[in-house]
Image (cartoon, rainbow, N blue to C red):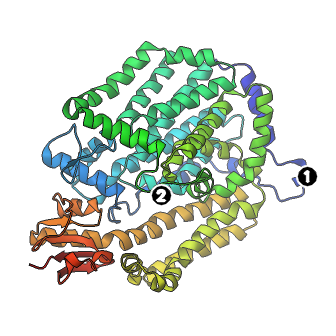
Amino acid sequence: MRPPAQDGERDRYASMMAPPPHDAGRRPAALPASVAAHPPLLALLALALAVLVSLFIGLGTVPLFDVDEGAFSEATREMLARGDYVSTWLNGAPRFDKPILTYWLQAASVTLLGMDEFALRLPSALAATAWIAAIGVFARARFDGADGPGTGHAAAFIAATTAGVGVIGRGAIADALLNLFLALAMFDIMRYATDGRAAQRRRAYLWIGLGLLTKGPVALLVPGAASCLGFALQGRLAAWWRALRDPLGWAILLAVAAPWYLLEYARRGDAFLAGFFMRHNVERFMAPLQGHGGGILYYLPALLLVLLPWCGLLLATVPAMFRATLLALRRRMASDDAFLWSWFLFVFAFFSLAGTKLPHYLLYGVTPLFILMARARQALHPAWLVLAPPLLMLAAVAALPYALERLVPGIGNAYVREALGRGEVFDSAWRVLAGLLLGAALGFALWRGAALWLRLCATSLLCAGALGGLLLPAVGELQQRPVKEAAQLARREGWDVQRWRIDAPSFSVYRAAVTPSTPAPHPGQVILTRSDALQAPALAGAHILYRKGGIVLLRVRN
């Protein structure tokens, strides 16, 4: 049973989300009427279309991005080639970056479908789909009554069309799967906080265990710390402590995660502890790794980028959410609100303090924002603030080829200049489609006869199409098509290739062979490198075998 005060708190929260009285003269968002006018089937079809556009259309047409996608994919290829399903390797060297579950899923996918981009990315796309579905199911069950019909569908639609979710859901990496398990764990913790059922907290232990197999200690840290803060905001730390001491829950977690960790330690010993726990977890927090640093305010602009094209909705609803939160804090914050805010704020604060900063780390805490924005969507005003981000996003995509034409000639670095200077990527069809998407978005934005929420949904869907159908394919063609072509040439010719001054693990995937790094080129070697390395004396007189977009395949002079 829910605590008796919870429904009352929800009603007060919902009332705070309504536009303030001085806005009565403005055109209302009319959300409840617009949602009620459409049957649930229509909302489900819109959500299915959003998932299809954001995650699946063209999933296998873009070359693998380096370094992350290439590293995961090559480690999976070497897993299958070696027949080693416990330890991971990258170009013949031990890889300690991530635990094993993503590699297992990719290995299963490529075994069934073949070694290509679609099969390697399919586990992430399916995980992102399940993540979106979990958001919709949870928000519908918890908030559709208090916050108006369609809250679950709205939260899922926001998640499905957000740029951050679309990017990692299309990536052959571990983050979509981790976010699925974080969401499932936190949702079951929130259910347990109100219902008190042992099965709910033990399912949370199961999801945390799977998260530990996906990306490591962060899967325990986020739900553990966020739930502690959530219970503390309600004055119920004793309940959190009881849940933490559940022996059966810990048995479930250890049964899921411990076998692989023990097997990997038995094989690699202290190298596993130093490589995985110390370097890729402790050191990643203490100092920037691989140049991924940033100031304490790094995640403020990153949040707006990750939430595109919905960041205007977040900014428009922040005042109402702030007022509602203050009201809730005075009366001991309602269970769901406490956990949603604790979840986001812990992730934001923790990774702001961490030495290594990457935008997708923030995704570990944006799931509650999807729900909070959906609950607060009655406060959609002013229209210009809500609609400006999708319009600016589509305008930036449409302007990209023209901006590159002006900027690229002035770039000094040869590799960057050649990589960005392939104007054939932006052909007439690309430019026309970008213009049509921008024009359609402008049409929706100016269509005053439609509710603002529906206009925002339509423009956001167009943004998802532009991201997955135009922007990511163009970036992939610029950055990765030459790597793929060079690898395919080397594979056809049977060349034994080594890398010098370049980190491109996708080359090994497409070549279907390990490509080790060489400390220095030697006469007769076939070398993969970048065009900005051609001035090195060691490459003087080398025979160029392939050169495109800054990627060079050459034979060193004998």
The 10 Å Cα crowd at callout 1, few under 14, some 14 to 19, many 20 or more, is few
Residue type of the residue flagged with mark 2:
Ser
On the image, the x and y values in percent for residue 266 come to 21, 29
On the image, the x and y values in percent for residue 204 come to 47, 26
Per the image, label 1 sits on a secondary structure element best described as helix
Residue type of the residue flagged with mark 1:
His
Q: Is residue 16 above or below residue 246?
A: below
Residue 337 figure quarter: top right
Q: Which residue is mark 2?
A: 54
Q: Is residue 189 visible?
A: yes
Looking at the image, residue 209 sits to the left or right of residue 267; the answer is right
Residue 148 figure quarter: top right
Q: Is residue 20 above or below residue 100?
A: below
- Residue at image coords 51%, 53%: 359
On the image, the x and y values in percent for residue 143 come to 66, 35
- Residue at image coords 19%, 33%: 267
User: Is the C-beta separation of discs 1 and 2 under 8 Å?
Assistant: no
Per the image, label 2 sits on a secondary structure element best described as helix
Which quadrant does the N terminus fall into? Answer: top right
Looking at the image, residue 519 sits to the left or right of residue 27; the answer is left
Q: Which residue is mark 1?
A: 22
